Image (cartoon, rainbow, N blue to C red):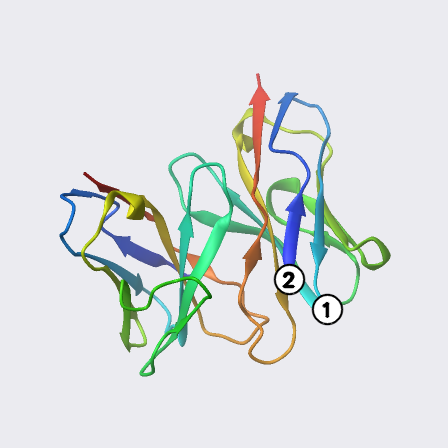
């Protein structure tokens, strides 16, 4: 089946640093990748949608200058949390799809981000 | 805006008991519906999906779900659960039109199966 690899799985860093999370589709070309955020005991909330070669579309309330998304190829998207602060601590999950609405998204394992 | 409501936060069952997890959605149009499962320490995996046709959908591992359009529901069922079904289950919806492929998730239902 389709595999999405997300790296790193867990990162702990000091407040003020920037953290980059990678999302790779290993055996298919992902026209579209999605980035979600999940707080404890809550649902996955879509942060942004990125299409290969174009700017990401951010959901309302998500700071695009804070959460930089790059989707430079059909197999790789990155999320960079810039100048991270403790309130950015969360579980970040990417998914990838060949996109059309009938294609299920395939999810990465998620990245647990802890900002001290 | 679309939304998904899962009624139960945590369900505890004994092995061999029957399971039904509720899911209701709100969306102003034709929908595609999904159930995902997340086993402890693993990524989200697709259990089953409904796009069109027979409203009773069969998925992996003996799960099924029924789409009832009049009730805006897509409940997940399994006749007899096993300890290995312990996981968190998420209902999700997308629109079925072009460009409407963003998944909206419910808050999830944690299922604990006691041996």
Tag 1 or tag 2, which sits nearer the N-term? 2
The residue indicated by pointer 2 is B2
Mark 1 falls within which chain?
A: B
**B7 lies left or right of A111:** right
Give the residue drawn at x 74%, y 67%: B52
Q: How many marks?
A: 2
- When the figure is inspected, residue A22 is found, relative to residue B62, above or below; the finding is below
Instruction: Look at the numbered discs 2 and 1 and tell me whether their residues touch, using CB distance below 8 Å.
Output: yes
Give the residue drawn at x 30%, y 71%: A75
Of the pair B76 and B24, the residue shown nearer to us: B24
Of the pair B35 and A43, the residue shown nearer to us: A43
Give how far across and how far down residue A22 sits, in percent: 25, 60
- When the figure is inspected, residue B18 is found, relative to residue A69, above or below; the finding is above
Give how far across and how far down residue B66 sits, in percent: 77, 51
Quadrant the C terminus of chain B occupies:
top right
**Is disc 1 surrounded by few (<14), some (14 to 19) or many (20+) residues within 10 Å?**
few
Give how far across and how far down residue B102 sits, in percent: 53, 67
Residues marked 2 and 1, same chain: yes
Quick one: which residue is furthest to the top in this view? B115
Callout 2: SS: loop
- When the figure is inspected, residue A87 is found, relative to residue A58, above or below; the finding is above
**Is disc 2 surrounded by few (<14), some (14 to 19) or many (20+) residues within 10 Å?**
some
Which mark, residue B28?
1
Of the pair A81 and B100, the residue shown nearer to us: A81
**B86 lies left or right of A29:** right
**CA separation in Å, label 2 and label 1:** 7 Å
Quick one: which residue is furthest to the bottom in this view? A53
Callout 1: SS: loop
Instruction: Give the image quarter of residue B2.
Output: bottom right
């Amino acid at each position: 089946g389709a595999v999405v690899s997300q790296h790193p799985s867990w990162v702990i860093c000091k407040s003020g640093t920037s953290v980059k999370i990678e999302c790779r589709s290993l055996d298919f070309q992902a026209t579209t990748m999605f980035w979600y955020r999940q707080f404890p005991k809550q649902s996955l909330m879509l942060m942004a949608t990125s299409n290969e070669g174009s700017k990401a579309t951010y959901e309302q309330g998500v700071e695009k200058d804070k959460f930089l998304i790059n989707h430079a190829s059909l197999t790789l998207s990155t999320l960079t949390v810039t100048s991270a602060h403790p309130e950015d601590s969360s579980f970040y999950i990417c998914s990838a799809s060949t996109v059309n609405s009938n294609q299920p998204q395939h999810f990465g394992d998620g990245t647990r981000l802890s900002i001290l | 805006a679309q939304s998904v409501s899962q009624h139960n936060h945590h369900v505890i069952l004994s092995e061999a008991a029957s399971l039904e997890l509720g899911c209701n959605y709100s969306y102003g149009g034709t929908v595609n519906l999904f159930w995902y499962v997340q086993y402890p320490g693993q990524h989200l995996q697709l259990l089953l999906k409904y796009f069109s046709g027979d409203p009773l959908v069969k998925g992996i591992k003996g799960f099924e779900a029924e789409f009832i359009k009049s009730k805006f529901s897509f409940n997940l069922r399994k006749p007899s659960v096993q300890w290995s079904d312990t996981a968190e289950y998420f209902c999700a919806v997308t629109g079925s039109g072009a460009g409407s492929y963003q998944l909206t998730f419910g808050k999830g239902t944690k299922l604990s199966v006691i041996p």
